[in-house]
Image (cartoon, rainbow, N blue to C red):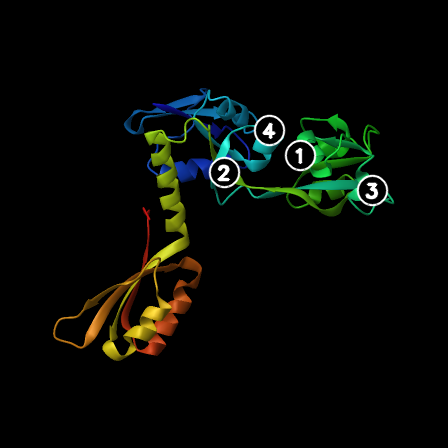
């Protein structure tokens, strides 16, 4: 039985729960406990602070875990990113008071910076920095006089504006959720099954299955519109000079492809959702 760490709160919590449930895992956080055993799939889930997960996975105490790329980078964890996930996108920005003359990130290199991510900031500047390290509410530090600027995760920027701060320059770091593994645990069967299931669900979210009939004289044109991941499935219809074609198409393009197939002469065009996949 492998051990997998999941976020116990924050913006990564619900998307992670939904993803694993869709992959067939029993990973709901129990009331007042930090673990959930999924006997059927051979996994024990641990619900931990996202910032602590890289340490547990990096040291091999936990075999794998889902957390933000920024948390793993800040912890300088040896945990290996094996799969990016389509949620938890964020950016880490520097901000200064509205009245500050500072206009660039370069001008901040000798300032006192309040942040929860000192390692990421030093990695950006590649030099020792003057920090006030805080766990939260970083934006208030400037008005309290303990820092000249802040570096923090920014979503809408509303909190910064309310604190009288403005963003300086481009983001220092961009992040999203990801699945990480301990380097020594990547070959475990249960870990590979977890990776394949998540990959299959991500493919299912990005593609749809299209099926249609078309006459032989437009088959090449129709197939060019629906090449599939490798190649479409093509079968001759009984008693007619027509063919049935089936292929996967990008979900965002699916309706436009249906229109083009109809205009080309295809008929009986059907579009199906994909629940999961193994590619």
Can you give x and y, in whole percent of width and height, for residue 9 in the image?
53, 30
Position above or below: 74 against 169: above
Earlier-in-chain disc, 2 versus 1: 1
Does residue 54 appear anywhere in the picture?
A: yes
Can you give x and y, in whole percent of width and height, for residue 227 in the image?
35, 64
Residue at which label 3 appears:
107
Q: Which mark is residue 76?
A: 4
Left or right: where does residue 233 sit relative to residue 105?
Answer: left
Disc 2 on helix, strand or loop? strand
Q: CA distance from mark 1 to mark 4?
A: 9 Å
Earlier-in-chain disc, 3 versus 2: 3
Does residue 22 appear anywhere in the picture?
A: no
Disc 3 on helix, strand or loop? helix
Residue at image x 23%, y 68%?
Answer: 244
Q: Which mark is residue 120?
A: 1
Position above or below: 195 against 42: below
For the residue pair 25 and 120, the one nearer the viewer reads as 120
Left or right: where does residue 116 sit relative to residue 254?
Answer: right
Residue at which label 2 appears:
178
């Amino acid at each position: 039985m492998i051990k997998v760490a999941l976020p116990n709160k924050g913006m990564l919590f619900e998307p992670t729960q939904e993803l694993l449930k869709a992959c067939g895992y029993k990973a709901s956080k129990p009331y007042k406990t930090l673990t959930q055993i999924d006997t059927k799939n051979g996994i024990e889930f641990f619900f931990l602070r996202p910032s602590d997960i890289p340490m547990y996975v990096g040291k091999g105490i936990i075999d794998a875990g889902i957390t933000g790329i920024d948390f793993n980078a800040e912890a300088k964890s040896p945990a290996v990113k094996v799969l990016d996930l389509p949620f938890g996108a964020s950016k880490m920005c520097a901000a200064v008071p509205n009245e500050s003359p500072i206009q660039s990130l370069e001008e901040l290199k000798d300032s006192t910076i309040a942040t929860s991510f000192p390692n990421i900031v030093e990695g950006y500047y590649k030099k020792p920095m003057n920090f006030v390290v805080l766990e939260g509410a970083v934006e208030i530090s400037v008005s309290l006089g303990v820092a000249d600027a802040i570096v923090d995760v920014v979503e809408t920027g509303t909190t910064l504006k309310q604190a009288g701060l403005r963003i300086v320059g481009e983001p220092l770091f961009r992040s999203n959720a990801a699945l990480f593994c301990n380097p020594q645990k990547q070959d475990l069967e249960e870990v590979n099954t977890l990776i394949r299931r998540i990959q299959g669900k991500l493919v299912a979210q990005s593609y749809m299955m299209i099926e249609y009939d078309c006459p032989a004289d437009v088959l090449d044109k129709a197939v060019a519109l629906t090449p599939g991941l490798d190649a479409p499935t093509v079968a001759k219809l009984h008693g007619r000079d027509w063919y049935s074609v089936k292929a996967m198409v990008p979900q965002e393009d699916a309706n436009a492809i249906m229109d083009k197939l109809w205009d080309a002469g295809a008929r009986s065009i059907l579009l199906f959702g994909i629940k999961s996949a193994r590619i």
